[in-house]
Image (tube, grey):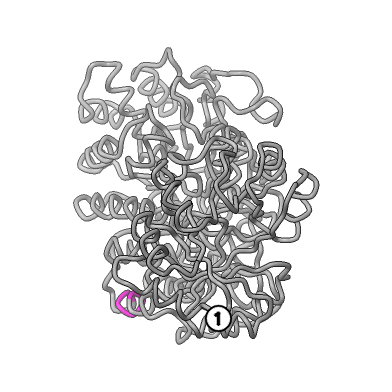
Amino acid sequence: MTRRTHADITFCRLRPAHGVTEAAAATRRAEGTTSLEMPCPDDRSVAACLSGGLLPVSVGVAEAGVISWVVPPDEALELSDRGVAGWRLTVVHTDDRSAVIDALARTSAAFLRTGRSRVGEAADICGLPAIDARPSVFADSVVEAVNAVDEGARDLLLRDWDTERIGELRVALGGRLVERVAVPGGITVDEARDSLVRDLFKAYLDLVDGGGYARPRYAWAPGMAVSPPLSPRRISAAWPDALWTDGAWPGMAQASPAVRAILDRSIEAKPPTVPEIATLLSARGDDVDAIAAVADVLRRERVGETVTYVVNRNINYTNVCYFRCGFCAFSKGPRSLNLRGDPYLMSIEEVVDRTTEAAARGATEVCLQGGIHPEFTGRFYVDVLSSIKAAAPEMHVHGFTPLEVWQGAETLGMSIRAFLEMLKEAGLGTLPGTAAEILDDRIRRHLCPDKIRTSQWAEVMLTAHELGLRSTSTIMFGHIDDPLSWANHLEVIREIQRRTGGFTELVPLPFVHMGAPIYLRGRARPGPTWDEVVLVHAVARLALDGLVPNIQASWVKLGTDGAARLLSAGCNDLGGTLMNETISRAAGASHGQEMGAAELEAVIEEAGRTPARRDTLYRAVEGRVRPRI
C-alpha cells in the first residue's frame, strides 16, 4: 500500500446504522455517504448496504463480509491474527495506552479512532516511530474540524455534511482535504482484489478513483452522452461546491511544494523522473490546475497555437477475436446494449471498397484494426495491404497493432523483422499504437492476460521504427490501473522514443466502461475521473517533452466538449474524422462514429485555436475537405 506523504487531511462521509435496507442505503448514497457503520452487521444488512452502493463497516468483530472493522485493541489483534490486512482496521483509542500502541504496531492499522478531548494524545501515539496510523475523529462543524486538525487529527469523520459545508472546511484548511471511503486511500486494486469478496470488491471499485480515494459524485464518465463536469474558470472538477466551481484557480502559489518543484524543472526543459511522474499523476485539486497550466505553456512553446486533425476512415474488418481482453466489448460485448450485433468478417473486397469510398471523400488515411480472427494468418494482413494499394495507391494505410504483427509473424513462422518487412513491402505506412493498454505487466496480467506483454509490444515497435515504419502510441487508462502504472507506461514510451524517434504522437484513451466485460463482472472501476483524464494528457506533455511533440485528445471517448477543454491542458490534436469507428461504440460510447472536418474545425476555432488538416505523419495537407457524400 502506498500512503500519501504530504500533509493532506482525509475525511470520510459515513453514517452509523443498525439494521439497513437497500432503499435506505441507496438514499444515504444519494446524500453523499460512502460508508455505513453497523454493530456486528448480519448478512442481510451487509447485502442491503452493498446493493445500495455503500460500503459496510463493522463496529466490533463480525463474520459478515464487511470492508473494515472499528474495534478495541484486543479485537484488532484477533482480526490481524486471522489474516485481516491492517488497511482494513481502525483501532479504538482506549484508556490503556500500552494496549493501543501494541495493537497499532502489530496490526499496522490505518486509523486510531479517538474522541474530541483526546486528539492530542492520539496524535502523540500515531507520531511514534514505525506507526503509520492516522488519528481519526468525528467532527460536527467546520470550527470543530479545524480545531481537531490543529490538535493533530489527520482524518475526519463527517455525518450529514452537505457539499457546501465540506467546501467551507476545505477552504478553512487551505485546500488540504481529500475524501476517502471506509478504508484509506492509496490501496491498489491488487490489494483490494486479494482481500475483498466479489460483491464487496465491486462496491469498492465503483466508489474509488485510481488512487483509491473517493470518486467525485458527478454522473459523467468517458463515452457517456453527458457533458464533462467543466467550469469556465478552472480545469479540475475535484469538488462540486460553489466555492470551487465558481472560483478561479488561485495560481501556481497554491500548488503543493512537491508538485511545484517538479513543474519548475519542467518549464526549464527537465522532464520528470518516473517517481515524479507518479507524483504528478496522483495530484488533486489546485495541483491539477497547476499541472494543466504548465502543460499548456509547454504545448504553446513546442507546437504553437495550431490544432491538427486528419481526415481518415477506420475499418474494423472483424469483431471475431480469440483473445479475451477484459476491457474489450467490441468482440464480445453484451447483446443487451445493442452495440455489437452478430459476429462478422469483412471480405478483402469490402475493405477495398471502403478504402476507395474514403478516398473519394477526401481521406488521406485508412486505419485498419480488428479482432484476431482464429482463421487469420499473417497472409491476411499482407493480402489486405496489397489489395488496398492496388486500388488506391496514394492512400496511407495505418494498420495492424503490435498484437496483430506478433500473431501474424507467429502464424507464418517468421521473425517479427521479416514479417514487418513483408508488410512494408505490401504497402503498410504506419502502425497504430493500440494493444498497449497499460504497458505495465502488473496490470496486464489481469486486464489482458493472454495478450502480448510489455516487452513484446516494445519489440514490435522498436523493430518497426528501425525499418522506417513510424507509429502512434496510446495509453488506455481508468480500469484497474493506478498512477504508478501510468508513469511506468510513459517511461516505456520514452525509452523507445529515445532509441528510435519513431512515435508521432501519444493518444490517451480513457476507459469506456459501460459495456466492458471486466466492468460488468465487477472487476474494474467505471472509467477515469475527469481530473484523471486531465492529468494523463497534461502529464504526458511534461513527461514526453522533447521526445513526442503531439498529444491527442479523443473526441470519441470524451465528446467534443471534453476534447476541446483538453486543448488548454497540453493537447494539440483532435485525431481523425474516422467514418465508422465501432470499437468505442461497442464498449458503450454514445459519441458519434464520424465527425466531419468542418465540425472539427469549428470545435477548434471555438476553443480559440487555429485548425489545420494534417496527414498521418503530421505533414500539412492543403485545401479544404470535400463535403460528405
Residue 625 in picture, x, y percent from top left: 59, 51
Residue at image position (63%, 70%) is: 239
Rendered view: 142 above or below 111: below
> Residue 257 location in percent, x, y?
38, 81
Image position of 629 (left or right of 577): right
Q: Quadrant of residue 148?
A: bottom right
Quarter of the image with the N terminus is bottom left
Q: Pick out the residue farthest to the top.
A: 375
For the residue pair 561 and 282, the one nearer the viewer reads as 282
User: Please, what is the three-letter code of the amino acid marked with disc 1?
Assistant: Ala
In the rendering, at what x and y percent does residue 469 appear?
A: 29, 41
Q: Is residue 526 above or below residue 114?
A: above
Q: Is residue 602 visible?
A: no
Residue designated by label 1: 148
| Quadrant location, the C terminus | top right
Horizontally, residue 319 falls left or right of residue 403, namely right
- For label 1, the SS is helix
Residue depicted at x 76% and y 49%: 26
| Viewer-nearest residue: 112 or 354 | 112
- Stretch in magenta: 262-266
From the viewer's perspective, tell me whether residue 23 is left or right of residue 455: right
Indicate the position of residue 41 as horizontal and vertical percent values: 65, 44
Give the dominant element type of the magenta stretch: helix, strand or loop: helix
Q: How packed is label 1: few (under 14 Cα within 10 Å), some, or many (20 or more)? A: many
Residue 110 image-quadrant placement? bottom left
Q: Nearer the viewer, residue 549 or 557?
A: 557
Q: Is residue 367 above or below residue 382?
A: below
**Residue pictured at 53% horizontal, 41% vertical:** 524
